[in-house]
Image (cartoon, rainbow, N blue to C red):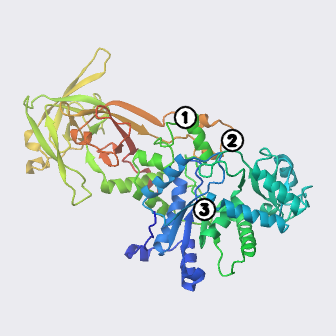
Amino acid sequence: MAEELTPLSGEGEAKKSLNFIEQIVASDLAAGKNGGRLQTRFPPEPNGYLHIGHAKAICMDFGIAQRYGGVCNLRFDDTNPTKEDVEYVDAIREDIEWLGFHWGAEYYASDYFERLYRFAEELILAGHAYVDEQTAEEIAQQKGTPTTPGVASPYRDRPAEESLDLFRRMNAGEFPEGAMILRAKIDMASPNMHFRDPIIYRIIKVPHHRTGTQWNVYPMYDFAHGQSDYFEGVTHSICTLEFEVHRPLYDYFIELLKQVEGQPDDYAPHQYEFNRLNLTYTMMSKRKLLQLVKDGLVAGWDDPRMPTICGLRRRGYTPESIRSFVDKIGYTKYDGMIDMALLEHAVREDLNRHALRGSAVLDPVKLIITNYPEGQTEDMPFLNNPEDPESDSHSIRFARELYIEREDFMEDAPKKYFRMTPGQEVRLKSAYIVRCTGCAKDAAGNITEVYATYDPETLSGRPEAGRKVKGTIHWVSAADSVEAEVRLYDRLFTDENPSEVKDKELAELLNPASLTVVQGARIEPFLAEAKLGEYYQFQRVGYFCLDPDSRPDHLVFNRTVSLKDTWKKVNK
């Protein structure tokens, strides 16, 4: 895919204040830095599926290039074959495109393995790197602390020729994993712990998804990332705040690379950091998310309870709602916790504008209108979306026997109960006013049928229909409605910040009520024609979408979010 992004335009864009990275980019372009070029990159490691935190980075990397007429490339950081898979590569591509972004060129860190390896050899010969044979535990002990200097490795002064020979033999496969590493020789007394002779290569004897068994040594992230940015011509390398302390090392290796390759001094990528996304009741660790999948605690990476982009997509979130959410939370230099209710507010706001309306009864009880002629039916017009002036309408069939929600009837109701109870009138939405006359029960005392009479002069839309009642309930035809399975979702975790809970196993943090499966729901025929990728509002119930598990003979709907906007109420 080689599609350059064009700048966004419009009144809203002009009025919107710039975040701090946009200010930097605008200033650099105005000053003519990097020859007036703007080039960013999105560099995911293909070791899992992208989650909502990555969506924030995607919106920054691609969005800023789009807004300022630059280009954003996609680069897979595939430097650890033990965790990476082509499945993840394909999923990452799909998620980025679904969010509405397109990359200029596609790269892989593995594209640069040969150049990085040669650079490592040059560092060894120049005295900037050496092969260390200590264990990981010994190296960790010698690192020191932020307030005490580290202790030099006994191999630190190993002759360059010896280190070069060992490094080449490491790559030839002569030594087992963990036997040796290549370390940069910098400063064991540096106050920046990342400068204390960091590891830059390790032995991994696992076939790579692109290079197979060609390599037995693989570069570390800190060594490969900045150089990859440099090779590709990245101008603004944008990442999250945890990499801020890595930035001096990023710059250090690039300066050494420029010296080795004899490149001019007028170009070097620069790293900028923004706050990562922390969301309540959400786990952002790909390692923990993978554990959820492997342990069977969720149905897969695309389980609608997961914070993955594919999980949110399956649940019914729209690309527009996720981009809107990211826009609402913004970018700063300070980490914080974002309320999940704001994400729900964003999707509710978007779906309210676009979702088609329909009627569904999740817990049905039969309503019999005793004075409505048997065999008679009426097709009532039902507007597909009242928020859309150009929205069409469909018909919903009214008949003597209907289904209503069980909770919309109460035999002995309190004073402020305005739904169906004996002696009280309610409006059946888009149809008539009815007066409840009673109910029938089974031997256990469960309500099996509700009875009512209707007033034929109160059809919605007629002048006579202006009679006021305090309650309106929805319904579907008993004869024409279709049975469906409905899945209702709640928070996956019970703790507001599950990542910080240290004394519990992952399974203990899960919300046992995170998924409720409702069998025997009844939906109007209009909804039975639902398609994957379409969005619906089940009136009075919430926003829903068709699940991929659906079959023509067994429809399955996922609830994206309820109609109630708790975030709006809290933030009034």
In the image, is 553 to the left or to the right of 490? Answer: left
Q: Quadrant of the N terminus?
A: bottom left
Tell me the crowding category of disc 3: few under 14, some 14 to 19, or many 20 or more residues within 10 angstroms, Cα based: some
Above or below 293: residue 188: below
Residue 440: x percent and y percent?
A: 23, 21
- Which quadrant of the figure has residue 370? top left
Residue at 16% of width from left, 36% of height from top? 434
Residue situated in front as seen by the camera: 203 or 150: 203
Residue 390: x percent and y percent?
A: 21, 60
Which label belongs to residue 275? 3
Which label belongs to residue 297? 1
Residue 249: x percent and y percent?
A: 74, 66
Q: CA distance from mark 3 to mark 2?
A: 23 Å
Q: Which residue is mark 2?
A: 502
Q: CA distance from mark 3 to mark 1?
A: 30 Å
| Among numbered discs 3 and 1, the one appearing first in the sequence | 3
Q: CA distance from mark 1 to mark 2?
A: 19 Å
- Which quadrant of the figure has residue 79? bottom right
